[in-house]
Amino acid sequence: MNQIVVIGAGQAAIWAAKTLRSEGYTGRITIVGDEDHAFYERPPLSKQVLLGEATHESLQIFKNEVVAELNIELLKPVKVTRIDRQNKTVYTNTNQAIAYDKLLIATGSKAKIPVEQWASYDNVVSLRSIKDSLHIGDKLNQVNKVGIIGGGWIGLEVAASLSKRNIDVTLYEMNDRLCARSVSQEVSDYLLKLHEQHGIHIRLSCKHLDLDQSDEDQSVTIHVDSSNDNDTAVYDLVFLGTGAHINKEIAEVSGLETSDGIVVNEYCQTSDPDVYAAGDVAIHPSLGFCIQSWSNAQHQGVVAAQSMLSQQVPYEEIPWLWSDQYDKNIQILGSPIDIDHCQLVVRADEDGDHCFFYLDNEKKLRYLVAVNNNKIVKIAKRWIKAEWPLDPEVLKDQSFNLMKIKPK
């Protein structure tokens, strides 16, 4: 095997390349990225970078000298337009034909724009890349009032960051609660209270709204379809946190099996045994849906590389993601599937830092939302892997040290 090609230049791609080299692969590695920037962490864009606490240069996953030692051929900004699986060749918009023995698709996701016209408004923005971040950064010094559409994790993170910059923020969410797809009513209530305490104006159940931008001053008006015919508000800037679009198109047109993302087995292998997928674009093999998280991209990139080298190490990572909002570090462990049928146990301390445990009918932990409690997240990973039954009374007892519950 002399040639491995990776489509995408993000977290999964660079970890795959690093793993290939660490495991002794000496052949050619070509990575094709469609951005000007490559191999950087995205989570800080909505937090530390937006607050001015971190630079774009600090987002690099590995130092330049580490990347140089990997001996990668990096093509950017270049877009792959076609995969010829029969002849094992990818074609680009720069008229290049690149042969491969193994191919990894790590194209990630991009911001979902609900209405095509909104993308043409200069003061309607989203945040998924350094390019987006630079665009927003140029505007924030002239901004006093921002509207955010979307009450998921990215919308809440941006709201918290802008609030800390003393910008007036109103957040619109179409559902009747925040983060409705990933947390329970109790956690939604906690998040609502947290943001309202910091001065964020939150409007729920905004199922129908529209935007228009003024030709005169480029301000953006949000119109909400409600019983009040004059339900409108004008903003200097509107941020779209309306979900993610999975970049699966290259797999679809190439005849690979897809659903909401690219279908892979536990070894990150697609329906073509010489083509792999990892990161946001790959469906989690046991959960059946795509997971958009930094850790998932990293671990799947590693497994894909190992699989290319015939090591057959299955992907078994427990889903984990985190969010920083104000002084709260919120970590989520496990899958939200069927949490409505789980028993919820809340452990709350005097600082208002809660842990929400979801136990199945055998008292085994299936899902956890922990606020400012990294230690509990670490031990909880062991409980889930061991399928260890837990006592609800012990979990909520603040006087009991949960670190003592150590699975055998």
Image (tube, helix red, strand yellow):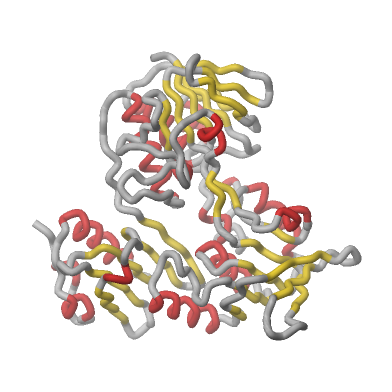
* Quadrant of the image containing the N terminus: top left
Q: Quadrant of the C terminus?
A: bottom left
Left or right: 16, with 142 as reference point: left
Q: Nearer the viewer, residue 37 or 91?
A: 91
Question: Is 169 drawn above or below residue 53 in the view shown?
Answer: below
Q: Quadrant of residue 90?
A: top right
Q: Which sits in the foreground, 231 or 368? A: 231
Residue situated furthest left in the rendering: 408
- The answer to whether residue 153 is above or below residue 355 is above
Q: Is residue 36 found left or right of 402 in the rendered image? A: right
Compared with 406, 263 (above or below) is: above
User: Residue drawn 43% across and 49% down?
Assistant: 290
Q: How many marks?
A: 0
The residue located at (43%, 79%) in the rendering is 190
Query: On the image, which quarter does residue 353 sit in?
Result: bottom left
Residue at 73% x, 60% y: name it.
Answer: 124
The answer to which of 289 and 132 lies nearer the viewer is 289
Residue 260: image x %, image y %? 47, 47
Residue in view at x 33 percent, y 43 percent: 285
Residue 402's spot in the image, x, y percent?
A: 19, 71
Residue farthest along the right direction in this orientation: 216
